[in-house]
Image (cartoon, rainbow, N blue to C red):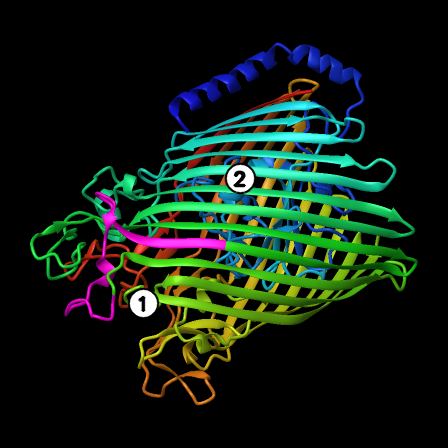
Amino acid sequence: MTYSRQRALRACSIAMLIAAAGLAAPHAARAAEAAVTADAGPDAPEVNQIVVTATASKATQVAPVRSSLNATEPEAVITRKYMEETAPRIGDFSTVAAFAPGMIATPQPNGPGLADGGKIQLRGFGDGSYTITYDGVPWGDTNGPSHHGTAFFPNSTIGGVIIERGPGKAEDMGPANFGGSVNLISLPLEEGKSLTQVVTGASFNTEQYITTVQSGDLGGARFLANFQELSSDGYLTFNKTWGNSQMFKGAVPITGTGLTLSALYTHTTYLYNKSDVGDADVYQLKAYGNNFSLSNDPTNQTYYKYNWARKQTNYEYIKLAGDIGHGFGIDNTVYSYGYDNDTSSTDNNLAGPGPYNWTATPGSKTPVVGSTTGPVTVMPGYTKKNEYVVTGDIGKVYYNSPFGKLTAGVWYERADTYRYNINLNLINNAPDYIDSWYPTGLPASKTATNINFIEFSGWKQYQPFAQFEWKPIDGLTVTPGVKYVNWDLYITSPIEKISKPGDTPLSIERIYTRTLPFLTANYRITNTWSAYAQYAQGILVPNISNLYVANNAGTSFLPQLSTNYQLGTVFNRGNLALDGDVYYIQFDHKIQSFTDVTSGQTYDTNSGGAVYRGAEVQANYALPYGLSVFGNYAYISAVGANDPTNPLSNGHQLTGVPLWTSAAGVRFEREHLFRSDDTVVVSLISKFVGSQYNTAASCSNVVSNASGTAYCAANSTLTPVTGLLPAYNQFDLSMTYRVGPYSIEGQVLNLLNTHSLVTMKGKNLLANGQFDLNDATINGSPNTNAPEYQVPTNFQITVRAKFQ
């Protein structure tokens, strides 16, 4: 975003807020005379909260996270009201979901929402092992079902979140219901006409401007438009972020039918200065400070102009849904989404001045094949593209009978991806043939190339399903279902970096199929108390990277599977909302990567799995005088099992999975504090994440028997699990004061200014097996352990005006 554009936008936003001041008194008078609806009141949130299928009570009205009496598996419902009053205005779904039971959102090192790297864990299942949907449509990357949260859906486009900790029902779509699903809901269409302007200023020279226009009811039709602009310097040095997003949504009833046609379109553009390979190592942090990442030194690999990414996304759907008579109904969504990522990066940002020298001498690794004079100056780096388009259709037909509801349908989807990675000398963008270098010269059979890979890949998949919600007695709903998965995955590549140099062509196609059973039950014990049970299987289709094998026979592995058994209960009455569950998950056919000791060929195969056991509990209690308290706790046991390739992983907690998480908070809300139309809300909420191991156990020599089963050879060296990351926590304080159509919101994030270690890359260990984070050098060489810490105390201040 250019400076002039940013200045114009700032002036426009401020002008709108000033103009609103002149309308305050007449608006308040009209509001006092008019009947105020739930979504159009002068002190209402700027968009409706999502509909929650639970009996209304004082506890649920103030709860930041809660469950539903109709739940058939453990779930967490997070409303827009919570997002506006407690979650960071500048952020993504990871900053919203962080306080749900069993959820782990690693604090973003550049500040909330200021990089496209927000990741969450769900019960220890990392990004790529669960599904994320937006308005019921699954979305994610095409080289594996991971996600770019900010690049697709910043907080300003999210109207609520429902987290389902399980595979769901047969009708729940997704490539990775293996671990559960995080379901994002778009901004709702409101009954009243309105214009809302939101301006946020935050630490690190951060500014965000959001404009939302609601058409209100136009003869049954409704429309909205939402625009966001963002700029920030970021907490990390020279990690700047610019971004904008546009969202349009509408719904029109079809006259004479029970059907409604709705549509949505979003588009985002983001530009980040960030290294593609890491932020900083211990050597750099000791030399330049805890927030060092990039520099303004063009002679160094950390130069910010060498390290950047531009990402554009689009997401759109058209949906036709409703009753068509005689108990029948339809729900059909045609959708498409796209992602275009252009990245420039140096080879190794974990490299500072001093012991690092980027002058290559002929006879070692030269940027020009055949050069005999020099030295030759080179800034080794690469440019890459990842561009994909996904299109699909989710069609459902249902029939409501006296015995229950029958639903059947099919999900069809196609993905097409174009990717490349090319080595360049970033000083002049000339080809860098560094990967074609050989100690004895380039073999005659090899052609010099600076191309790591050029790849066309994708899939065609379909999933028919059927389920029946049977109600044999009052209060009991039993839902059996079945789904069939057929996933056709392919790669066609003229150059794929499978062996050195990267000039191996690759053409491979694999079809993965599976029939998945589902069975859920919900029993309404009373109007305020229910219990549920679930048996379900989930599937995780292999990633594109699992097919990077020169020998196609090395890709004959199975999809990873989960089998879930869960019991839970939900109580919601008066001042108390309480829910809890226990679960057992069998994780089978774990896909792991190994290197053949004879050929040097890397390959993936199924080996072992894990057993997940846990318990989760959550409570909200409304106290007198506007006070309420909230808390949850999750015990997560995720233990390796049946792995012949690595005996030391069996019976040990998986790396990256904490044994427990918890959250706690207190909230105060009072109306009519100084005026008849004002409200104050104050909340203090904290998240705790237990300690976790970082580096997995290993076996030095994995071989295969005659049947192709991999196992650890008897003469191997076994390395145990190492690198225990300590537990950490974060306290956030949020304050909101509303007067009529205006509000001011303030947040202090990481209130206690903790600086805990949250993630780690590296191999330099102390004698006790923990990471060395104190020594800048080890045996005269830089300490290349690369830690990431919490961002220190920072703030966000938001001013909002809503005109109706």
Against 189, residue 375 (above or below) is below
Q: Which residues are magenta?
A: 417-446
Q: Is residue 301 left or right of residue 167?
A: left
User: Percent position (x, y) of residue 232?
Assistant: 40, 33
Location of residue 322 by image quarter: top right
Q: Element at badge 1?
A: loop
Q: Give amino acid for label 2.
A: Pro
**Image coords of residue 291 (percent x, y):** 31, 42
**Residue in front for this viewpoint, 554 or 640:** 554
**Mark 1 or 2: the one toward you:** 2
Residue at 31%, 44% in the rendered image = 307
Q: Is residue 591 above or below residue 39?
A: below
Q: Which residue is mark 2?
A: 154
Q: Is residue 441 magenta?
A: yes
- CA–CA distance between discs 1 and 2? 39 Å
Q: Quadrant of the C terminus?
A: top right
Foreground of the two, 456 or 638: 456
> Does the magenta run of residues contain 256?
no
The image position of residue 293, as x and y in percent, is 30, 44
Residue 174 shows up from this direction: yes
**Nearest to N terminus: mark 1 or mark 2:** 2
Q: Which residue is mark 1?
A: 769
Name which quarter of the figure residue 251 lies in. top right
Q: Residue at x 69, y 60 (%)?
A: 73
Label 1 neighbour load within 10 Å: few <14, some 14-19, many 20+: some
Report helix, strand or loop for mark 2: loop
Question: What amino acid is found at the position of numbered circle 1 in the picture?
Answer: Gly
In terms of depth relative to the viewer, which is nearer, 665 or 457? Answer: 457
Q: Nearer the viewer, residue 25 or 48?
A: 48
